[in-house]
Amino acid sequence: MFEGTLFEFTRVNLIQLIMTVAVASFFIVAFRNPKIVPRGVQNLGELAVQFVQTQIIDMIMGVSGRRYLPYLATLFFFILAMNLAGLVPFLNLAGTSVVAIPLMFAIVAWLTFNIAGIRKHGFVPYLKTNLFPPGVPKPVYVLLTPIEFLSTFILRPVTLTIRLLANMMAGHLMLVLFFSGATYLLLDAEWFLKPFGLGAAAMGFFITAFEILIALLQAYIFTLLTALYIAGAESEHH
Amino acid sequence: MVHAAEGDVPEGIDIFIPPWYDIFWSAVMFIALFGIFWKYVLPRMKTALEARSEGIEKKLEQAEVERNEARALLEQYREQLAEARSEAARIRADAQAERESIVTEARSEAQEAAAAVNERAEMQLTAEAERVRTALSGDIGRLATELAEKIVGETLDRERVSATVDRFIDELEAAGGGQEQR
């Protein structure tokens, strides 16, 4: 669809769209008519949002970080949904297993924590605390400043991107490997190889369960690290 | 199904170079979802949570007020009970005292009545004794005179004899009166 243009729409984009609509509808339904005493899906929605609020924001940033809740909650549920798409039958591909989404989130996180730090401390003091950490003998800065620059302003978004991308790609490859292997072994292989097909299918099952964990974990880690970077940029001492 | 994805997957360094359309669509979806969370989901949740906290607070306050009321009421009941008890004790004591006074009064009345009866009986007895004595003294005089006439054999002067007898009886009485306790 629209191939070669900005609006080209591929299978991954379709998966992303489906998962976005799914997440949006879930939360819209959950809070369509919020009750004082929550029932059913509202409970689940509150539980989910409060997980982000208490386990990520309150723990890392303190109560003052609650203003980032819309951003971090969206980030968490978007990544989680994209990750889980890799396990949903007929989708079978994580939205995060192409570089665009992890990279986009990494750039947004980079912009957010830098802007937060500059707004809090001012441009020069912010750079100074990051590039010239106090309490170090002056000659050390020759070595320390490039390292700090690299780690804070270059590697942070890169690691965020690659961690998520690689995890989801690897998960996808594992699933493809075991399930296609199982299919081949069970259907096309020599008779004495067929029992191994069951083993491969079993492995595929365990990898699927493992991928659920990874999907949650990577969404959590990405959001947690973003929160950590923002909190670090805003904090007085580095 | 699993294989279908293979055609789309970039290889080599292309893995890390996103096509623009990918970024575009991801950004559109992310912004849409962000908008939904920011403007719809989270405010509604916040409202619901605040209403819940408020409701709970109100309930707790109300419970506190009601507990205090109940405590005051209990205190009041206890006071009333104690009052009622002391009232009952007082009434009982009063009744006791009253009963005693009634008994005492009745006793003294009875004693008075008994004394009056005694007195009246004594007076009657005295009068009776007087009457009997008078009658006896007349009879004795007459008998003595009759006896004397029989002895003497003639009629005596009644008036003189009567005077003599009366004097005699008076003397007897005077002599007896010294000994008799009246």
Image (cartoon, coloured by chain):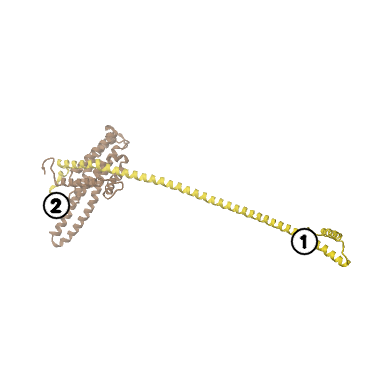
Chain colours: A brown, B yellow
Q: Classify residue B122 as left or right of residue A222.
A: right
Task: Confirm whether residue B123 shows in the render.
Answer: yes
The secondary structure type at the circle numbered 2 is helix
Give me the chain letter of mark 2: B
Which of pointers 2 and 1 lies earlier in the amino acid sequence?
2
Would you name the residue on which mark 1 appears? Answer: B132
Quarter assignment of residue B163 = bottom right
Mark 2 and mark 1: span between their CA atoms? 160 Å
Quadrant for the N terminus of chain A, please. top left
Where residue A202 appears, as percent x and y from the top left, is: 20, 57
Quarter assignment of residue B31 = top left
Quarter assignment of residue B54 = top left
The secondary structure type at the circle numbered 1 is helix
Where residue A64 appears, as percent x and y from the top left, is: 31, 39
Residue in the image at 79% along x and 60% along y: B134
Q: Which of the two residues, A176 or A58, is positioned nearer the viewer here?
A: A58
Q: Which of the two residues, B173 or A200, is positioned nearer the viewer here?
A: B173
Mark closer to the observer (2, 1): 1
Task: Confirm whether residue A155 shows in the render.
Answer: no
- Residue B3's label in the rendered image is 2
Q: Which of the two residues, B7 or A131, is positioned nearer the viewer here?
A: B7
Give me the chain letter of mark 1: B
- Residue B41's label in the rendered image is none
Structural crowding at the residue carrying mark 2, measured as other residues with C-alpha within 10 Å and reported as few (<14), some (14–19) or many (≥20): few
Quadrant for the C terminus of chain A, please. top left
Where residue A128 appears, as percent x and y from the top left, is: 28, 34
